[in-house]
Amino acid sequence: MSAPVLDADVVAAQVAVRAGDGSVPRELLFRALGGGTRCHPAPRPHLTPRQTAVLSLMADGLGNADIAAGLSCSEHTVKNVIYETMSRLQARNRAHAVASAVRCGLI
């Protein structure tokens, strides 16, 4: 069992959230979710490079418009990729998709 995540990174993330910044550094999220030790469903899902890129940007807190601009595609394409990715990961929402991807070591 891993040690609880209680250090300066957590305090900094809490201060940022209270100030209105909703993003959490990926490394902190990874540690808080158990370091990728629990992947569900059992077989590791395969994601395309585009799906992985979108998930990474979602984990960084970007919205669909910013993801589309960063990947030089339309918001409609981003929505489709998110829908397909959530289906593949059996995720209920964006946060669940990011958490599942982190747990499985996909991002």
Image (spheres, rainbow, N blue to C red):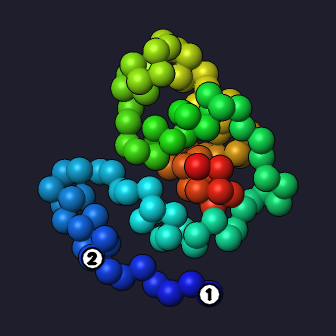
Above/below status of 41 relative to 55: below
Q: Residues within 10 Å of mark 1 (few under 14, many from 20)?
A: few
Q: Does residue 34 appear to the left or right of 27 in the view shown?
A: right
At x 41% / y 24%, what residue is drawn? 70
Q: Is residue 76 visible?
A: yes
Label 2 or label 1, whichever comes before in sequence order: 1
At x 48% / y 21%, what residue is drawn? 71
Residue linked to disc 2? 8
Q: CA distance from mark 2 to mark 1?
A: 21 Å
Instruction: Check the picture and name the quadrant holding the N terminus.
Output: bottom right
Q: Does residue 21 appear to the left or right of 51 in the view shown?
A: left
Q: Is residue 83 visible?
A: no
> Could you say where residue 28 lies in the image, as x and y percent from the top left?
42, 65
Residue 13 occupies which quadrant of the picture? bottom left
Q: Nearer the viewer, residue 12 or 91?
A: 12
> Could you say where residue 78 lies in the image, as x and y percent from the top left?
53, 22
Residue linked to disc 1? 1
User: For the residue labelled by badge 2, is the local secondary structure a helix, a strand or a loop?
Assistant: helix
Residue type beneath disc 1: Met
Residue type beneath disc 2: Ala
